[in-house]
Image: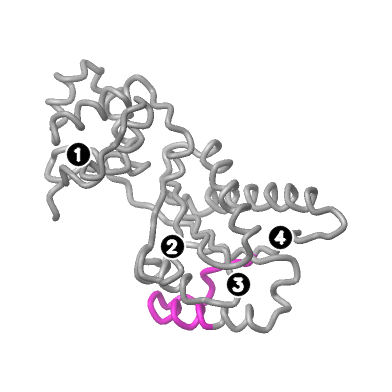
């Protein structure tokens, strides 16, 4: 049931390219079919420091994937002193439209918004764009990533966290996995009483969003899945519950 596809990266960029390189090379492993959209403010490409950051990223990534052109740059309208609110909404609409367009073009199975760099207003626009895109694209993994200032920690947050409303079937599956730890397809069918085709569809969606994972023919709820389940139930999540039980490593 696992589906392999390309990744679309949306990365806010300022003068420091290090976070982008770590995201592409270390955390998410950019590959041949992937595409990167760098988000900069209007006239950002006229800034020598931004241009130098792009050149550095290009050299490093090209070494790993051997591809000449793997990215595009979007210059958004903000900031606009004459019309700050209007330029904000125009930028949001443009970025969302472009992300949806590129996701379709490359058949992206994952869309990753890295908001670690650049102007604060660009990070907010990208954050909101991730939510808009998630409402238009189904069965895709969409997440936001941010690196801490000390560059030690890289946090990944699924956009699903913005909407903790689970369907009845999603709730049944997550509750069963939360209680039992790990279940096979047969066991889930017996436990949830969901029709086989519906269960497969539900599991596919949960896996695409990173709420469930499959290891050795068993399904496990992830820490993200447990957090969203508990939020939907209004249940308090103990710190220890974010990391157990775990699926076995391959």
Question: Which residue in the protein does label 4 denote?
Answer: 76
Query: Is 135 on the left-hand or right-hand side of 22?
Result: right
Q: Earlier in the sequence, mark 1 or mark 2?
A: 2
- Spatial separation of the CA atoms under disc 1 and disc 4: 41 Å
Q: Check residue 68 for magenta coloring.
A: yes
Tell me where the magenta segment starts and ends, as one range.
56-73
Question: Which residue in the protein does label 1 denote?
Answer: 220
| Label 2 crowd bin: few (<14), some (14–19), many (20+), radius 10 Å | some
Please tell me whether mark 1 sits on a helix, a strand or a loop: strand
Please tell me whether mark 2 sits on a helix, a strand or a loop: loop
Q: Position of residue 95 (x, y in %)?
A: 65, 53
Q: Earlier in the sequence, mark 2 or mark 3?
A: 3
- Numbered disc in front, either 4 or 3: 3
Query: What residue is at 65 percent from the left and 66 percent from the top?
Result: 40
- Spatial separation of the CA atoms under disc 4 and disc 2: 25 Å
Q: Earlier in the sequence, mark 4 or mark 2?
A: 2
Please tell me whether mark 3 sits on a helix, a strand or a loop: loop
For the C terminus, the quadrant is bottom left
Q: What label does residue 32 carry, if any?
A: none
| Label 4 crowd bin: few (<14), some (14–19), many (20+), radius 10 Å | many
Query: What residue is at 74 percent from the left and 59 percent from the top?
Result: 78
Question: Which residue in the protein does label 2 denote?
Answer: 33
- Spatial separation of the CA atoms under disc 1 and disc 3: 39 Å
Q: Quadrant of residue 221?
A: top left
Residues tagged 4 and 3 counted as in contact (Cβ below 8 A):
no
Q: Earlier in the sequence, mark 1 or mark 4?
A: 4
| Label 3 crowd bin: few (<14), some (14–19), many (20+), radius 10 Å | many
- Numbered disc in front, either 1 or 2: 1
Question: Which residue in the protein does label 3 denote?
Answer: 14
């Amino acid at each position: 049931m696992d589906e392999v596809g390309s990744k679309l990266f949306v990365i806010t960029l300022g003068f420091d390219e290090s976070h982008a390189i770590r995201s592409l090379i270390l955390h998410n492993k950019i590959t041949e079919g992937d595409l990167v959209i760098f988000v900069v403010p209007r006239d950002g490409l006229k800034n020598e420091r931004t241009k130098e950051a792009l050149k550095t990223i290009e050299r490093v990534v090209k070494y790993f994937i051997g591809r000449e052109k793997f990215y595009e740059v979007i210059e958004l309208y903000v900031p606009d002193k004459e019309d700050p609110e209007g330029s904000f909404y125009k930028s949001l609409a443009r970025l969302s439209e472009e992300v949806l367009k590129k996701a379709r073009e490359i058949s992206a199975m994952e869309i990753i918004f890295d908001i670690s760099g650049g102007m604060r207003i660009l990070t907010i626009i990208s954050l909101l764009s991730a939510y808009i895109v998630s409402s238009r694209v189904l069965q895709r993994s969409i997440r936001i990533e941010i690196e801490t200032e000390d560059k030690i920690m890289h946090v990944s947050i699924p956009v699903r966290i913005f909407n903790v409303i689970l369907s009845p079937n999603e709730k049944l599956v997550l509750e069963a996995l939360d209680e039992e730890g790990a279940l096979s397809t047969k066991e889930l069918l017996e436990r949830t009483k969901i029709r086989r085709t519906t269960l497969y569809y539900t599991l596919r969606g949960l896996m695409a969003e990173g709420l469930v994972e499959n290891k050795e023919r068993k399904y496990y709820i992830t820490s993200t899945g447990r957090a969203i389940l508990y939020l939907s139930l209004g249940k308090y999540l103990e710190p220890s519950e974010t990391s157990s039980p775990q699926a076995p490593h391959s």
